[in-house]
Amino acid sequence: MQKKDNNDILNEDFTDNNIDDYEEQSEPETQDDTPENIQEVPRKLKKNNKIKNHSRFPEEPDPLFDDYEEYSKTEEDFISEEDYEPEPKTVQEMPRKRKKKKRKKRSRLPGIIILTTFVFALSICLSLVIIAFGRDMLGIGKSDSTHLIVIPEGATTVDISELLKDEGIIKSPECFQLFSRLRKSDSSYIAGEHFVRPNMAYETIINELTSIEEAEQQETVEVTFPEGCTISEAGYILEENNVCSADDFVFYFNSAGLGFSFENRLPTDTSLKFYKMEGYLFPDTYFFYENMSPEQVCQKIYLNFDNKMTPERYAKMESLGLSLDELITFASVVQKEAANTDTMLYVASVFWNRLRNPGYFPLLQSDPTSNYSEFVSAKMDVYDKTIVDSYDTYKSPGLPPGAICNPGIEAIDAVLENVESNYYFFIANIYTGQTYFSETLEEHEAYQEMVEGQVDEYLIASREAEREAEQKAKEEAESEAQNAET
């Protein structure tokens, strides 16, 4: 078979008839015009064949091919009708491509606002902390009340800073320790008593705790307050020893509020009390300085009382259902009634029995309370019968509204001991120190008559002894005068 030339193939394939036949063969029969029934017969290209765009009128020369002389047409370059393999397929809906949603760009403004707010809040907090530490370091806006600090032997800076914090002098022990270290004062603190105030700067406090120059320049005064003394009597003792004024002492002592732990147990209602802090001056020997501040004197006395009231005593007090003020008031009555410490336990038991049997004994009937009532009446600028009578246990039931003196530790422990007995009466011979206890009124009256006789005998004997002493002194004086003349 003779091989056809490329031009012949073109002329043969693209004649009008062939084209019409090709078109007729290419158009599928359709039942209707609905898109669902439309079928497409795609032209399948054999492998390695190329599809060329052909003009409907091939007779006319194509300028494109004329420009390329090296282009040679082969049979494989053209697609004949036989090259198409019809494969009927139903039209399938192509999956729609989802349009990618454009991500909205998030605004950075909220983040910037949050960050700015956080930085601003942090700055404010840091500023407040710095200001607080600065105020504490300089003592700004703090109390000017004097506090007595006792530094024990061998105390470190850490111990001292914690002690100052417990006393309400400073707020930051760590800051004080750092300041002390920078000042190189860790090894300069002096053991003993020191007076400081919360409104002192750290430097002033350290100077006070590391210096004894002021104490060395003052003269030490030893003062003893006896058991059963009153605040007024204690004031006179201080004034006689040139420590401070009696009136100033009484004023500061009754002002309270010095920051000691026992003060938290004091009653809030003191409307019936004459002296608010009567009973809280612990009888003892103290060492003061001449011309000392009354506030510092009160600090030393308050500290001693606070130390004497141990946790064990508080535990006993609470187990008996007593408040601190009731305990001290009770002990003050025992202190004044007991002739000596040996009888205090049973004197306390008499008053315990009366307090527990108010139906039979509505009144304590203690003579020292009547005496204190008279003292209050004499001291009042404006007489108040309610206060005066409230101290007199012959007129008012129960304990007085406050202490009638400052009891010693023996009287306090006697009340806390709560010795059981059947005694409801007692009478003491104040001259001999002998006390007689009884269970009934008849026994009590018999002891009372006996004691009165003893007292009369004692008074007669004492007057006779005084006359003899006076006569002896007179004779000695006359003898000396005669010897002088000779």
Image (spheres, helix red, strand yellow):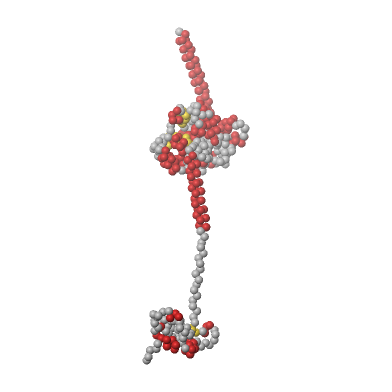
Residue 190 visible (yes or no): yes
Say which residue appears at 51% left-offset and 53% top-offset.
116
User: Depth check: 463 or 376 in front?
Assistant: 376
Q: Position of residue 114 (x, y in %)?
A: 51, 55
Q: Position of residue 193 (x, y in %)?
A: 44, 34
Task: Count the numbered circles shown.
Answer: 0
**Residue projecting furthest to the left:** 1
Say which residue appears at 49% left-offset and 52% top-offset.
119
Say which residue appears at 46% left-offset and 38% top-offset.
202
Q: Quadrant of the C terminus?
A: top left
Residue 36 versus residue 471 in the image, above or below? below
Say which residue appears at 42% left-offset and 38% top-offset.
183
Q: Position of residue 195 (x, y in %)?
A: 47, 35
**Residue projecting furthest to the bottom:** 1
User: Depth check: 118 or 172 in front?
Assistant: 118
Residue 21 visible (yes or no): no
Residue 30 versus residue 287 in the image, above or below? below
Q: Position of residue 310 (x, y in %)?
A: 46, 40
User: Depth check: 206 or 404 in front?
Assistant: 206
User: Depth check: 314 or 307 in front?
Assistant: 307
Q: Quadrant of the N terminus?
A: bottom left
